[in-house]
Each structure stands twice: as C-alpha cells, then as structure tokens.
Amino acid sequence: MELRSVEELMELLYACQGAAPDGGGAPTPVDLHEHALQTAALLRRSRPADKELQVAGLVHAIGRLLPPGGAGHADLAADAVRTLLGERVARLVRQQGSAGRHPDDDALTLRQAHDAATVPGLDAGVLEDWRTVLELVAARAVHPSPGARPVHHLPGA
C-alpha cells in the first residue's frame, strides 16, 4: 500500500488508537497511537530542527495496520510512506525496525525514542498538531530544494 496524501496518512494514524504497539505481544501501557505521538514528541524535544526524523518517529509503526505482504511491519511502513514523505523518512523507518542492520546515528536516535515512548499519561500532544509538519515534509519530498541536505540539530542552535 502506498500512501498518496497527508489525509490518508492522518486517517491511518488515527486508526492506531486502541492498537497494541507490539502486535499483540506483551501488554504495553500505551496504544499504538499514543506510542507514535510520544516517539515524535521525544524526537521534537531532542532534535527540534530535524522534521524528517520527527515524522519518521510519528509514522514508524503504521506498518502494523497494513496488510502483510511478506515483509515486516517496518518494511511495510517504509514502503507506504516513501513516495509521500521521501527516501530519508522511509530509510529511517526501515532501519528503526531492523536491530540487526547497521543503523546510522539518526536511526539510533529514533530507536531510543521508540524504546522510551511507553509512558502512560505523558502529554505528547494530539495528532492534529502534526498535520502541518507532515505537509511540510511531504512538500519537500515532492519538490526538494536544489542541493538540499537534511537539516540536523546543531549544538547551541
């Protein structure tokens, strides 16, 4: 499944409400929706300038809601968002779900936020707060600036 609009992505993210983050494995204190919001919020705090990393944190687990196609949930999520959100977001989502691969520093930061995003009652905002960021990242994926490089957090910035 390939997501073609931010609206389709938002609907899928809303559908995460009540879904278990670990695919029905061990019980977790938050649902998939809250887990996604917490992951993105933690990344927003630690890397405020890196919108693509934050968005990867928001969408990393949507693959759990997609029909299986022989791939793991991280691969399904990465494939679903690649066209809409770009190669970097897709790569981060794929790497986050693959502990055995050699992820880069951004993927490790995403993994750490993922692991920490299970706190009941943590105020991570609401999904609608992310619509503008999703639209921004989607617009950049469709019309990247010439010579543009991903924006990373700079110490002291």
Image (cartoon, grey):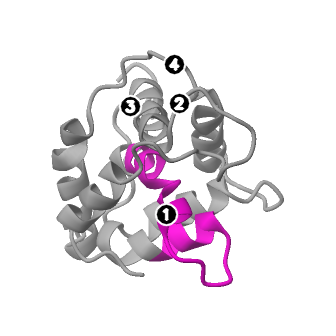
Residue 44's mark? 3
Q: Label 2 neighbourhood size at 10 Å, few (<14), some (14-19), many (20+)?
A: many
List x then y, in percent, for residue 16.
41, 50
Number of the label disc, if any, that sits on residue 109 = none
SS at circle 3: helix
Asked whether disc 2 touches disc 4, contact meaning CB atoms under 8 Å apart, the reply is yes
Gap between marks 3 and 4 measured at Cα? 19 Å
Label 2: state its secondary structure: loop
Instruction: State the separation of the CA atoms marked 2 and 4.
Output: 6 Å
Q: Are marks 2 and 1 in contact (CB under 8 Å)?
A: no
The front one of 35 and 154 is 35
Q: Main secondary structure of the magenta part?
A: helix
Type of amino acid under label 1:
Leu
Q: Nearer the viewer, residue 51 or 98?
A: 98
Q: Amino acid at mark 2?
A: Val
Q: Are marks 3 and 1 in contact (CB under 8 Å)?
A: no
Q: Decide if residue 148 is on the left or right side of residue 33.
A: left
Return the disc, 2 or 1, that comes first in the chain's sequence: 2
Residue indicated by mark 2: 30
Circle 4: residue type: Pro
What range is drawn magenta here? 53-79
**Disc 1 target residue:** 65
Tell me: 34 left or right of 110.
Answer: left
User: From the viewer's perspective, is 139 left or right of 155?
Assistant: left
Residues at marks 3 and 2, CA–CA distance in whole angstroms: 19 Å
Residue at the disc numbered 4:
120
The location of residue 10, given as percent across then percent down, is 26, 56
* Residue at the image point whose x is 55% and y is 20% from the top: 119
Task: Give the quarter of the image for residue 34.
Answer: top left
Identify the residue at horizontal 43%, vertical 74% (top origin): 80
